[in-house]
Image (cartoon, rainbow, N blue to C red):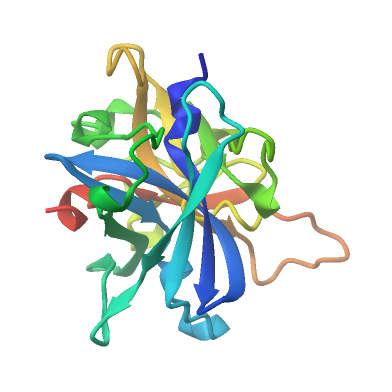
Amino acid sequence: MIEPLLLTTAQVSTFDGERPLTGASGFFFEREGRLFLVTSRHVMIDAPSDHFPNRVEVELHTDVSNLTRSTSMSVLLHRDGKSLWRQGSDAGGEIDVAVIELDRSALPESAVLSCFTPAHLLRSLQEVEVGTSLLIVGFPLGFHDALHHLPVVRQAVIASSFGLRFQGSGYFLTDARTHRGTSGAPVVMRSPSTDAELPWKLLGVHSARMDMGSRDSQVDETLGLNCAWYADILLTLTT
């Protein structure tokens, strides 16, 4: 039996038509029978880097007894000149989280995936302490089990006061080794009482590494800190 946590997360590839652009991570979130793909907003669009994909491809398993079998599902990002994904903002500005609803009828009948739900979100942000152990599930630099199409996990800990908006923005910090391609990965905490099949709490969505602009790259190492946007934004984006 494969751990269901590894089936929550899929590799996301962005395209401009047939031209490949970038690779990232994403995960599945189900609410009231509707299925969503969650990733970072900058995967969908990022003006500063001139990143304007018009579709993404999501890799899906197609055989529960043979994980070497998979297919790619193409998802358009625009229709009639309007974006199909949803993104949020708050008093601190834009939130680097995006969701797009997936058409269940377009999925292969044998598609194998596992979904987070609102039950996997924290009831109170005060439930977690600084230093709590976490996992970040994703595709760093595109690296993964390419034979079985499964992500890898990195260990992390909460590095800022959880429940407080770090420097006024809607994210908290994690201490973990991360790379490009991890954007959009779920940040989770083990919680056996949550769900017998998926015993994890979904705390956040990994966004990017944090660094100091004043760091001397010849002398100082990177901070090794990352931004993770609070996952409760999904309740707003999936209504």
- Estimate the x, y position of residue 23 in percent, counting from the top left: 59, 61
Vertical order, 88 against 69 (above or below): below
Q: Quadrant of residue 129?
A: top left
* Residue sticking out furthest to the front: 109
* Residue sticking out furthest to the right: 218
- Estimate the x, y position of residue 233 in percent, counting from the top left: 24, 52
Instruction: Determine the residue positioned at 73% across, 66% down.
Output: 215
- Estimate the x, y position of residue 45 in percent, counting from the top left: 43, 76
Q: Which residue occupies the foreground of this view, 77 or 98?
A: 77
Instruction: Determine the residue positioned at 28% across, 27% down.
Output: 127
Q: Which residue occupies the foreground of this view, 96 or 61?
A: 61
Q: Is residue 183 left or right of residue 44?
A: right
- Please indicate, yes or no, whether residue 190 appears anywhere in the rendered image: yes
Q: Which residue occupies the foreground of this view, 164 or 138?
A: 138
Instruction: Determine the residue positioned at 69% across, 54% down.
Output: 141
- Please indicate, yes or no, whether residue 223 appears anywhere in the rendered image: no
Vertical order, 80 against 67 (above or below): below
Q: Is residue 30 left or right of residue 50?
A: left
Vertical order, 81 against 187 (above or below): below
- Estimate the x, y position of residue 231 in percent, counting from the top left: 31, 45
Q: Is residue 53 left or right of residue 219?
A: left
